[in-house]
């Protein structure tokens, strides 16, 4: 007997497996539970033996429902994260997934309003953006969080920034 897996995780995993085995996107399940019918941004993180293998998401909903948001972002994380080569069928049994359902962004004016254990961060400047999810291993200070966001968004130290914090509901 396998251990219980949250339906969001099953959906992400099924999306990647289905695509790699059939070269087509998984259809949206029907019927959907109430939570999967809702609309919300979501990040899908894929790890292989505890090492990040892909992570892509949306801060705001871009699909008709959360189920499609997870299906789409799981595929993008598996196949289109520019930091990694696409995941192959041979890797499937070594992968673990986590889903972060994104709560609405809140604009903040000072770093004192942040806590990397609780809030994710979006840093924006002149059309550029860096995003960091909350509660990540190795990110323990607000300064690191801001620095990583600037770096991800290619925003230099002297560029003024707007900051937005957000909370997530994480499923593993």
Image (cartoon, helix red, strand yellow):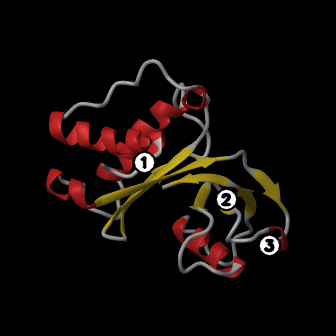
Tell me what residue is drawn at x 59 percent, y 36 percent: 61
Task: Give me the disc on residue 111.
Answer: 3
- Is 20 drawn above or below residue 163 in the view shown? above
Q: Is residue 153 above or below residue 104?
A: below
N-term-proximal mark, 1 vs 3 = 1
SS category of the residue bearing label 3: helix
* Quadrant of res 13: top left
For the image shown, how many numbered marks are present on the structure?
Answer: 3
Spatial CA distance of label 1 from label 3 is: 39 Å
- Say if 167 sits above or below 22 in the image: below
Classify mark 3: residues with Cα within 10 Å, few (<14), some (14-19) or many (20+). Answer: few
Single out the residue that lies furthest toward the top.
31
Q: Position of residue 30 (x, y in %)?
A: 43, 19
| Crowd tier of the residue under label 2, counting other residues whose Cα lies within 10 Å: few below 14, some 14–19, many 20 or above | many
**Left or right side of 137 for 80:** left
98 to the left or right of 19: right
Locate residue 50, reporting x and y percent: 36, 71
* Distance CA(mark 3)–CA(mark 2): 14 Å
Which residue is tagged 1? 4
Task: Give how far across and how far down residue 162 sits, in percent.
Answer: 75, 61
Q: Nearer the viewer, mark 2 or mark 1?
A: 1
Q: Residue at x 48, y 55 (%)?
A: 172
Task: Write the residue at 61% across / 37% down.
Answer: 40
Cα separation, mark 2 vs mark 1, equals: 39 Å
Quarter-of-image position of residue 118: bottom right
**Residue pointed to by mark 2:** 124
The earlier-in-sequence mark between 2 and 1 is 1
Q: Nearer the viewer, residue 65 or 127?
A: 65
Q: Secondary structure at mark 2?
A: strand
Task: Find residue 126 and name its label.
Answer: none
Mark nearest the camera among 1 and 3 is 1
């Amino acid at each position: 007997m396998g251990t219980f897996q949250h339906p969001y995780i099953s959906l992400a995993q099924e999306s990647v497996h289905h695509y790699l085995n059939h070269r087509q996107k998984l259809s949206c399940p029907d019927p959907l539970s109430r939570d999967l019918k809702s609309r919300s941004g979501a990040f899908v993180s894929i790890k292989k033996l505890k090492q990040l293998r892909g992570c892509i998401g949306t801060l705001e909903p871009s699909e008709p429902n959360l189920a499609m948001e997870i299906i789409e972002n799981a595929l993008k994380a598996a196949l289109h994260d520019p930091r990694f080569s696409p995941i192959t069928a041979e890797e499937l049994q070594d992968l673990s997934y986590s889903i972060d359902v994104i709560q609405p962004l809140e604009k903040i004016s000072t770093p004192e309003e942040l806590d990397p254990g609780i809030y994710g961060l979006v840093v924006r400047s002149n059309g550029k953006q860096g995003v960091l999810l909350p509660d990540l291993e190795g990110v323990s200070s607000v300064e690191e969080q801001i620095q990583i966001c600037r770096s991800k968004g290619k925003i230099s130290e002297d560029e003024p920034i707007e900051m937005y914090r957000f909370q997530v509901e994480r499923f593993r």
